Amino acid sequence: MSATVQQFVVGRVRPGSRVRSCIGLTLAILAGGCSHSSSLTAAPSGPTVVPVPKWDVASKETLRLGASEHPLPKYAGTMVGNTFSVSADNNHVAYVGGVAHYVETIDPFYDTDTKTLKGVDYYVVENGKPGKSYDAIQGIPLFSPDSKHLAYAARRGKRWFVVADGQPRGPYDAIAEGSLTFSSNSQHIAFSAMVKKHWIVVLDGKPGPVFEWVGQPAVSSNGAHISYAAGLAGNRVLVTDGNPATIVGKIAYGPILSSDGLHVAYSAVRGGTALVVVDRKDDAPFDEIGDDLVFSTDGKHVAYSAKKEGSWLVVSDGKPGAPFAEIGTGPGFSPDGNHLAYSAKAHGRWFVVADGLPGPAFDNIGSGIVFSPDSQHFGYSAREGKNWVIVVDGRSSNPYTAVATDSLVFGPDSRLLAYEAIIGKRFMLNLSAIDGRIGSTPFHDGPPDASEPVFDSPTALHTLEVAADSNALERLSVTVPGRN
């Protein structure tokens, strides 16, 4: 059974959207647990962070990893486009397959035959088994956050369905592409659909009120609350739990819900200004608002990036931070809500700002900043010149040729950090410790495009790799012997 890891990623795409370039796997050990002076600490008056230390010296290869490989079902049929999807636990894979049908015409006079395309049957292949065929399948199959459910939109004739766990729901005249979403507890599913030239939002098979148009729905973790933008009698409204309320201006991003569904926020444009509205209360106006509005897990805090007078800054609970030339990844909160991190640029250099204090400067910062489950550590990838490093609590690793910048994940005890990288020209599964220890084991041909490392326990993890037979995947399991 997989260990439960509360992984917090700044600037990561939503669960189910796991299409990226993965290029190797590395582990970093946080020696001594939370004893580093550079780890995050929260003072009674509020969150603070100790200034970051200098770079570490070169590490030595002193750790050995245990590794084993197990084959997964081979691909069935032909994959259509870039539709490959992997569940969050790496135990399930799915993609859209297709079979073309032709009509053969024989001309006896010229002794020739002609094949004309009659149609294509599309289906979703899950774990090597094809499902029911349809005339069209929309987008990429979506796994639930707990990896137990699979859903996608499909068309048969002129009618559209949402297929969840193999069972079609509908029919509808249209399904809004990209609207399909699971609640964070994986027990609820929502999407936007058209019925008789009007739009509705469907939650767990139950249609909501009819509108002229509807936006992307946001669902609370327990499925008890839902919110979305919509059009009603020519007006823009915010619909929360089926109740529309007129809004002033145009919603630019959102709405988003806190995990308990008790708080709702969105960014709006009014005339020549932009602002964020939280629980129907306006924040201060800015020239522009970033598409990164986020609640803390407990719903007590909200943050976003904003532009004013040519500079970008991060606003947390209505309070603007320091101005920078650009804001990159983030902002994002730690699991306990006490810490906030994002990447920023000033004087041509990039760095991560944690609790208001900037870290080491680099040429570039990767797209993923992650907090440990205990909220005491944070890590990210950074590039200096041609090399990439992993930075944990301000300390950097040995250089790598390349790093999958959004692949970082902490282990359940917050002492291990896994990430994917290339050393030289080899795809390697590496173990790198900020106290100087490393270990490694090779991939066959490298990981697939949608796989990420997953911890099964504090000392064991797995990922997927491309097998020597390129038409198959293997589960690569790794252990850290002697690690207590």
Image (cartoon, helix red, strand yellow):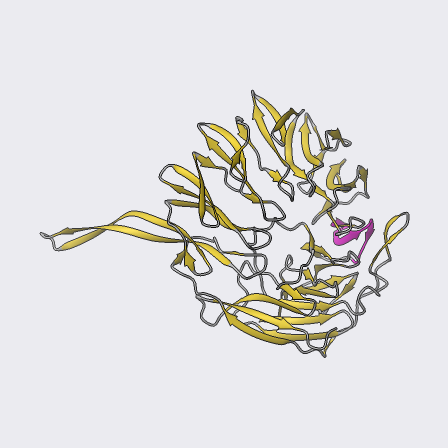
Q: Is residue 305 something one can see in this rendering?
A: yes
Q: Quadrant of the N terminus?
A: bottom right
Taking the magenta stretch, the answer to whether it contains residue 349 is yes
Vertical side of 60 occupied by 235: above or below: above
Q: Which residues are magenta?
A: 342-360
Q: Quadrant of residue 201?
A: top right
The residue lying toward the viewer, choosing from 27 and 382, is: 27
Residue 270 x/y as whole percent: 68, 26
Residue 404 placed where, x, y %? Answer: 62, 61
Left or right of 483 on screen, residue 455? left
In this rendered view, identify the residue nearer to me: 232 or 190: 190
Residue lying at the far top in this picture: please name it.
Answer: 233
Q: Main secondary structure of the magenta part?
A: strand
Is residue 29 toward the left or the right of residue 227 in the image?
right
Percent coordinates x, y for residue 65 in the rendering: 65, 76
Q: Is residue 424 visible in this depiction of the protein? A: no
Using the image, determine if residue 373 lies above or below residue 135: below
Q: Position of residue 171 (x, y in %)?
A: 42, 37
Left or right of 389, for residue 199 = left
